[in-house]
Structures are given as C-alpha cells and as structure tokens.
C-alpha cells in the first residue's frame, strides 16, 4: 500500500512540467559556468525519477529496526571514508539506486525517527565542526533540517535558530518539535529576526555560525508552475547576492573572534557562490578562508564536485548515480583583531 502511494506520488511529480523560461535562463548561464558538465547536470535536474533521498537517523529516537531493514535492502552509510570531522552519533543512509522512504507524519509528543534530505545538505553541517558546549547560530534555519543535523553531531551549549519568513518559521518550529526531546529544547532559541540585523543584536556571541542563505533554488525553480512568476524571479535574481553578502556580514559580526562561519546555497550560480565569498574576503580584513579541499577528496565516492577556484569553497553537482546537489559550501574564520 505504501509503495503504491509512493509510486503515485512519484508519477505526479514526473508529470510536473519543466518551466521553459527557467530552463532557458539556466542553459545560457550554466553552460558557460560549468562547460560540458552542464549537460549531465541538466539531465538529472530535469528528471525527478533520478533524484535520490538520504535518510538521516534521529539519535533521540533511534530506528534500530529500520536500520536492519535498510542493511538488508543494500543501503549504505554516507561518508564511508573517514572525514576529518564525522561524529559517530550522526548516521545517514542512502541507496545506490533512486529510492524514497515515506515521510513520517508530525505527531505531538512523538519524536520522528528519521529525516529525509538531499545528502549534500549535510556537508555545510559537517564543515562547521560543531563541538559539545559551543554556542551556534543557524541564521536562516527553516525548514530546520540543518538544525536537526547539527544536533545529531553534538550537544551545543546554546543553539539559536533564526528565520525571518513567518510561514517558514512555523515549519521550523514544527521540525524542531518533531525531532528534539524536551530537555534539549531548553538550549534552543527560535527567533524571527531579519538576519541582516542579527550581528548588531548579538555581537560576537557565537562560536559557530551557519548561513544557509536564500538563493536561486535550482531544483524547485525548474518546476515553477507559473511562468510569469518564474520570469519575475529570474529578473530579481541579480538582487540575491546583495542579500547574501549582507547576511554574511551580519553573521561575521555575530561571530566571536576565532570562530568559524559556513556559508551554503543550493544553487550552481557563481554570482551567488564564489563571487559572494570573494566579496566578503576582499572587504573584511578580519575574515580568512579555511581550506576544506580534504572534504571533497574524502567524499568523492558519494559526491561529484565541480571546480570552484577556491580552497575554501566546494560545489556539489548532480551526476549519474550521485544525484546529490546542487550544494555550495564555503568556510571562513574570523580572526582576532590586533
């Protein structure tokens, strides 16, 4: 019955029309930026039947029976090679063939056992290298997957989840309620502040900051149902880097000297990725790049990376059998001022 429902849902997804306005725009931009790799990326982004979903286990309600079942079905754990930072408490499974588990329903008082996600979205969380007791800010936190993933890695002394959009904020609260036990809720604060104001409101408060910024969400934009809205989005797209830079500037202010910042997006766009980070490095004498190349080398079994020209930045691109991404990740450090 579950499989029948899933198949029907998958077929409905496949029936969605690709938005020609968006595809033409991406074709023009990404064929220049990615070269020949764009052909494969385009084929996967426009074929939902190729998409994969990873299964992140919730350590606060561990699914032992499901784990046995996944092993029998040939699933394997993500990051089979050892990363510089990979907490044993984080368990994420994936299948080598496109497949999707049913989502669990939100039930008040019952913690969910797993979270479905694009496996590449764990890279920003792991790049942050959260340790027990640290104060961490998730600046653009909705829908909450990365906050949940952070709590699979360590027990922070304080986790501040911020989301400016009121509808997305409701989604964030529900996600946290579905995955996090009551005792831990006491170390979590949820706010609805404009992320650009956070640095002034909470100066030098945090050891680690994650800026998973609003961006051109390439996967969802390609299936925009309203072509007029899509055209409007594309015309406003050039404004996104301005917002992203302002969010990072605010995050730098909120970061204590010596602290780390990770910036991420789910777009292939160089203007929203490498160019944003270059602007921050060129305009902040107290911000330095952190080399994360080793992460790409270690993860090459599970992900395909496109060159970024930056040691501090990685770009995961969808590939055959590795349909993860797009996901850009960059790591920066705030230095002490003399």
Image (tube, grey):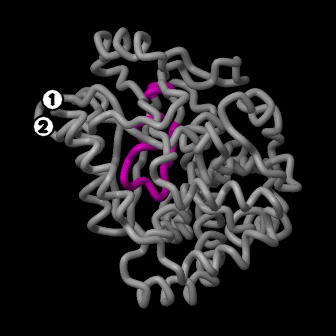
Label pair 1/2, CB-CB below 8 angstroms: yes
| Residue beneath the point at 69% across and 68% down | 269
Q: How many residues crowd mark 1 within 10 Å: few (<14), some (14–19), many (20+)? A: some
| Residue beneath the point at 36% across and 9% down | 68
Q: Is residue 284 visible?
A: no
Q: Is residue 105 above or below residue 172?
A: above
Q: Is residue 65 above or below residue 190?
A: above
* Mark number displayed over residue 199: none
Q: Position of residue 257 (x, y in %)?
A: 71, 47
The CA span between labels 1 and 2 is 5 Å
Q: Position of residue 176 (x, y in %)?
A: 29, 41
Q: Is residue 94 visible?
A: yes
Q: Foreground: 104 or 37? A: 37
Q: How many residues crowd mark 2 within 10 Å: few (<14), some (14–19), many (20+)? A: few
| Residue beneath the point at 50% across and 63% down | 198
The quarter in which the N terminus is drawn is top left
Magenta region: 135-155
Residue 80 included in the magenta stretch of the image = no
Find numbered disc 2 in the image and state the secondary structure of the residue it sits on: loop
* Mark number displayed over residue 110: 1
Q: Which residue is mark 2?
A: 107
266 left or right of 220 in image? right
Q: Position of residue 270 (x, y in %)?
A: 74, 67
259 left or right of 117 in image? right
């Amino acid at each position: 019955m579950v499989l029948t429902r899933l198949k029907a849902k998958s077929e409905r997804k496949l029936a969605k029309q690709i938005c020609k306005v968006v595809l033409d725009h991406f074709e023009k931009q990404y064929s220049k930026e990615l070269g020949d790799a764009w052909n494969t990326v385009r084929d996967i982004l426009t074929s939902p039947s190729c998409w994969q979903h990873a299964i992140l286990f919730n350590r606060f309600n561990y699914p032992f029976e499901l784990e046995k079942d996944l092993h029998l079905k040939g699933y394997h754990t993500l990051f089979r090679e050892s990363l510089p930072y990979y907490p044993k408490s984080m368990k994420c499974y994936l299948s080598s063939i496109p497949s999707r588990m049913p989502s669990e329903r939100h039930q008040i008082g019952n913690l969910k056992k797993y979270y479905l996600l694009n496996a590449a979205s764990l890279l920003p969380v792991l790049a942050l290298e959260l340790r027990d007791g640290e104060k961490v800010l998730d600046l653009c936190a909705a829908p909450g997957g990365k906050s949940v993933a952070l709590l699979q890695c360590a027990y922070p002394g304080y986790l501040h989840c911020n989301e400016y959009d009121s509808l997305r904020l409701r989604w964030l609260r529900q996600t946290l309620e579905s995955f996090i036990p009551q005792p831990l809720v006491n170390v979590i604060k949820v706010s609805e502040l404009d992320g650009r104001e956070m640095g002034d409101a909470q100066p030098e408060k945090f050891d680690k900051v994650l800026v998973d910024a609003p961006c051109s969400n390439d996967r969802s934009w390609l299936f925009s149902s309203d072509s007029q809205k899509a055209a409007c989005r594309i015309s406003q797209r050039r404004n996104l880097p301005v917002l992203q830079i302002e969010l990072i500037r605010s995050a730098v202010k909120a970061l204590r000297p010596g602290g780390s910042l990770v910036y991420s997006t789910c777009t292939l766009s160089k203007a929203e990725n490498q160019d944003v980070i270059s602007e921050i490095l060129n305009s902040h004498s107290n911000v330095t790049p952190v080399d994360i190349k080793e992460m790409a080398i270690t993860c090459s079994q599970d992900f395909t990376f496109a060159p970024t020209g930056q040691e501090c930045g990685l770009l995961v691109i969808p590939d055959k059998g590795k349909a993860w991404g797009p996901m850009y990740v960059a790591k920066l450090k705030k230095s002490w001022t003399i």
